[in-house]
């Protein structure tokens, strides 16, 4: 996750205190996300890209088309090719690690991902909504009553308050209820898919107080009007 997103987690739903012009100016001058690529496990790495190369993400209806190969990592004579999960330009390659044995989690390179208008809106919303993040790396599902209300009325019509059972966390074949802690508001944005694992600390959904909804809509309208390209 980019530094810009990390900062967003601390903002909360205080959109009326945010300088929209400054936010838009930031994205217009630097309309990119910077995705760091790390070694998935220990092994000897061999880079398959160089700085400045364009790479494509995994694609296809069932994600059956592999992305561009970024690097190979070899552990105990078991080589594995690692492909791009986002499109963009390769940057900040730690070329001194090419051919070297590295530990898991070592940063290898960065992909500079050009943001589309929809992504700009989603990123700005993450900066102004109150984000509820995954307490552990696991699969998440909305509680049955919450999911039923979302299915009937849409997430924007569902209000939750602190103490509500909001999610079920599925980890190691055990299901655990997750209770919401935070300000009362409506579920504005959902960032996870049922049955798909979410890393600890990543946002699950964004909450906004009901009286802030017009401000959120103003953000969306402003970006659509001011952003003159969809990349």
Image (spheres, rainbow, N blue to C red):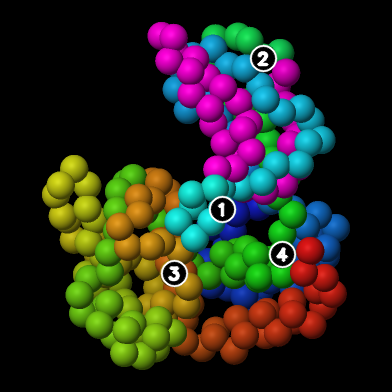
Residue identifier under label 2: 98
Tell me, yes or no, whether the two marked residues, 2 and 1, touch with CB atoms within 8 Å.
no
Residue wearing tag 1: 59
> Residue shown at 41%/77% (left/top)?
187
Q: Which residue is mark 3?
A: 190
Disc 4 residue crowd, few under 14, some 14–19, many 20+, Cα 10 Å: some
Marks 3 and 2, the one that precedes in the sequence: 2
Q: Earlier in the sequence, mark 4 or mark 3?
A: 4
Residue 99 location, quadrant: top right
Kindly indicate whether the residue at mark 2 contacts the one at mark 3 (C-beta within 8 angstroms): no
Q: Nearer the viewer, residue 203 or 214?
A: 203
Q: Secondary structure at mark 2?
A: loop
Which residue is more in the foreground, 148 or 84?
84
Q: Is residue 121 visible?
A: yes
Residues tagged 2 and 4 counted as in contact (Cβ below 8 A): no
Classed neighbour count for the residue bearing mark 1: other residues with Cα under 10 Å, few (<14), some (14–19), many (≥20): few
Judged left or right of residue 194, residue 207 is right
User: How far across and how far down the image is residue 13, in percent?
Assistant: 53, 72
Q: Which residues are magenta?
A: 66-95
Quadrant hosting residue 145? bottom left
Which mark's residue is nearer the viewer, 4 or 3? 4
| Residue 64 horizontal side relative to residue 143, left or right | right
Q: Quadrant of residue 92?
A: top right
Q: CA distance from mark 4 to mark 1?
A: 17 Å
Q: Which residue is disc 4 drawn over?
A: 116
Does the stretch in magenta take in 48?
no
Find residue 108 and name its label: none
Mark nearest the camera among 1 and 3 is: 1
Q: Is residue 161 above or below residue 82?
A: below
């Amino acid at each position: 996750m980019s530094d810009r997103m990390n900062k967003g987690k601390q903002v909360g739903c205080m959109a009326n205190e945010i300088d929209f012009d400054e936010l838009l100016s930031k994205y217009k001058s630097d309309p990119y996300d910077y995705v760091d690529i790390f070694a998935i496990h220990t092994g000897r790495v061999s880079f398959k890209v160089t700085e400045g190369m364009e790479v494509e993400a995994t694609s296809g209806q069932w994600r059956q088309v592999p992305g561009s190969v970024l690097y190979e990592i070899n552990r105990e004579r078991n080589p594995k090719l690692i492909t791009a999960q986002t499109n963009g330009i390769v940057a900040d390659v730690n070329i001194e690690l090419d051919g070297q044995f590295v530990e898991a989690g070592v940063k290898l390179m960065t992909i500079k991902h050009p943001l589309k208008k929809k992504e700009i809106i989603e990123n700005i919303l993450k900066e102004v909504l109150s984000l509820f993040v995954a307490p552990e790396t696991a699969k998440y599902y909305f509680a049955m009553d919450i999911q039923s209300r979302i299915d009937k009325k849409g997430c924007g019509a569902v209000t939750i308050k602190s103490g509500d059972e909001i999610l079920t966390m599925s980890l190691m074949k055990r299901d655990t209820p997750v209770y919401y802690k935070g300000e009362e508001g409506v579920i504005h944005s959902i960032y996870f898919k049922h049955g798909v694992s979410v890393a600890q600390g990543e946002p699950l959904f964004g909450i906004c107080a009901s009286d802030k909804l017009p401000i959120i809509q103003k953000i969306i309208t402003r970006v659509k009007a001011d952003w003159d390209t969809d990349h």
